[in-house]
């Protein structure tokens, strides 16, 4: 009798194969999804970096040409890029500014890099829009520019900006709105440094802008006798004023005729032609021994004591 030899082998069942395929498929799909997210994140990052470069280029151009807003009569918000025609922007008063706006428009539109004989623009950001919010300078303030760049993202996130900001409402869904902004200021206009004393502070001045027009000059120990004045209607002096007789104020031109003295005054003779002009003598010190040689102080000439701060303002004093 012949005996048969039966050998049992172990293999995979269909169910095991199907489970393995399922696990492999899920893993591959997860990896593909991860790759897709990574690519979108890379695109978002590159778009933001490019937008920052575009905004910074305009900031630097404004710094180099800070009068662009005034010269070109910027509106409160100038829109450039997608949906605008600023590629032909005109500003005859500031040709450098005109070129800056036109070139910025091209950057936002991606026109600086193209393919297919210029028909496809690849050098910009997606639906890029630029905005310049301009605030004109007023007394003691500087011109202010807010340079913003908006673009359309590739996936929905939180809104890039609130209502009224650059590009808001231009991308169908606010969660696709991307935005960044920079502030830049123009040069100072009538802005006084906090370190500079104000003439109204009452400091003791070292010099004054208001000239002394008396013929005897402004040196120390000057002998004054019937001192005559010429030029304008105001004359200012650092130090005491002593005239052995009286000043001839009627030679001053214009009105009101004023002497501003940072110190004491002494006018020894109040007669003669001292009353020939209507004038005011302002002084910070005292009226000492006036009219000691004769006469009385004329009603046409007013002697008025003032503070140091009042003198500083009137005489354009500096510390």
Image: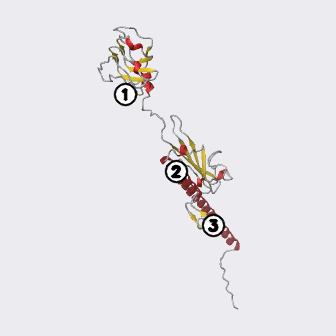
Discs 1/3, front: 1
| Res 165 label | none
Secondary element at tag 3: helix
Q: Give the image location of residue 81, x and y in percent.
A: 60, 54
Above or below, 206 relative to 98: above
Q: How crowded is mark 2: few (under 14 residues within 10 Å), some or many (20 or more)?
A: some
Q: Give the image location of residue 142, x and y in percent.
A: 51, 39
Secondary element at tag 1: strand
Discs 2/3, front: 2
- For this rendering, which residue is in front, 307 or 248? 248
| Res 207 label | 1
Residue at 49 percent across and 37 percent down: it is 189
- For this rendering, which residue is in front, 250 or 140? 250
Residue hosting label 3: 28
Q: Give the image location of residue 18, x and y in percent.
A: 69, 71
In the rendered structure, the answer to whether residue 287 lies left or right of residue 53 reads left
Residue at 67 percent across and 68 percent down: it is 22
Residue hosting label 2: 95
Q: How far apart are marks 1 and 3 (CA)?
A: 84 Å
Q: Compare marks 2 and 1 and give the one earlier in the sequence.
A: 2
Quadrant occupied by the N terminus: bottom right
Q: Compare marks 2 and 3 and give the one earlier in the sequence.
A: 3
Whether tag 1 and tag 3 are in contact, CB under 8 A, the answer is no
Discs 2/1, front: 2
């Amino acid at each position: 009798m012949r005996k048969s030899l039966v050998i049992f082998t172990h293999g995979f069942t269909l169910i095991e194969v199907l489970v393995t395929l399922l696990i492999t498929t899920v893993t591959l799909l997860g990896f593909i999804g991860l790759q897709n997210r990574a690519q979108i994140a890379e695109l978002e990052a590159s778009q933001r970096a490019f937008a920052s470069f575009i905004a910074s280029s305009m900031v630097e151009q404004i710094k180099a040409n800070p009068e662009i807003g005034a010269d070109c009569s910027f509106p409160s918000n100038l829109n450039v890029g997608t949906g605008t025609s600023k590629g032909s922007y005109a500003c005859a008063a500031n040709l450098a500014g005109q070129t800056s706006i036109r070139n910025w428009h091209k950057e936002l539109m991606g026109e600086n890099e193209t393919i297919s004989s210029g028909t496809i623009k690849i050098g910009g950001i997606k639906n890029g829009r630029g905005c310049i919010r301009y605030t004109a300078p007023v007394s003691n303030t500087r011109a202010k520019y807010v340079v913003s760049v908006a673009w359309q993202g590739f996936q929905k996130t939180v809104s890039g900006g609130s209502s009224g900001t650059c590009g808001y409402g231009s991308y169908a869904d606010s969660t696709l709105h991307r935005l960044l902004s920079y502030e830049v200021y123009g040069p100072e206009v009538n802005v006084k440094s906090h370190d500079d004393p104000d003439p109204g502070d009452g400091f003791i001045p070292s010099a004054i802008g208001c000239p002394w027009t008396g013929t005897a000059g402004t040196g120390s120990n000057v002998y004054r006798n019937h001192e005559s004045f010429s030029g304008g209607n105001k004359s200012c002096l650092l130090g005491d004023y002593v005239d052995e007789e009286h000043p001839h104020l009627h030679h001053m031109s214009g009105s009101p005729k004023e002497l501003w003295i940072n110190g004491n005054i002494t006018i020894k003779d109040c007669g003669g032609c001292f009353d020939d002009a209507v004038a005011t003598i302002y002084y910070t010190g005292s009226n000492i021994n006036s009219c000691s040689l004769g006469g009385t102080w004329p009603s046409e000439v007013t002697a008025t004591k003032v503070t140091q701060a009042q003198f500083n303002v009137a005489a354009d004093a500096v510390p």
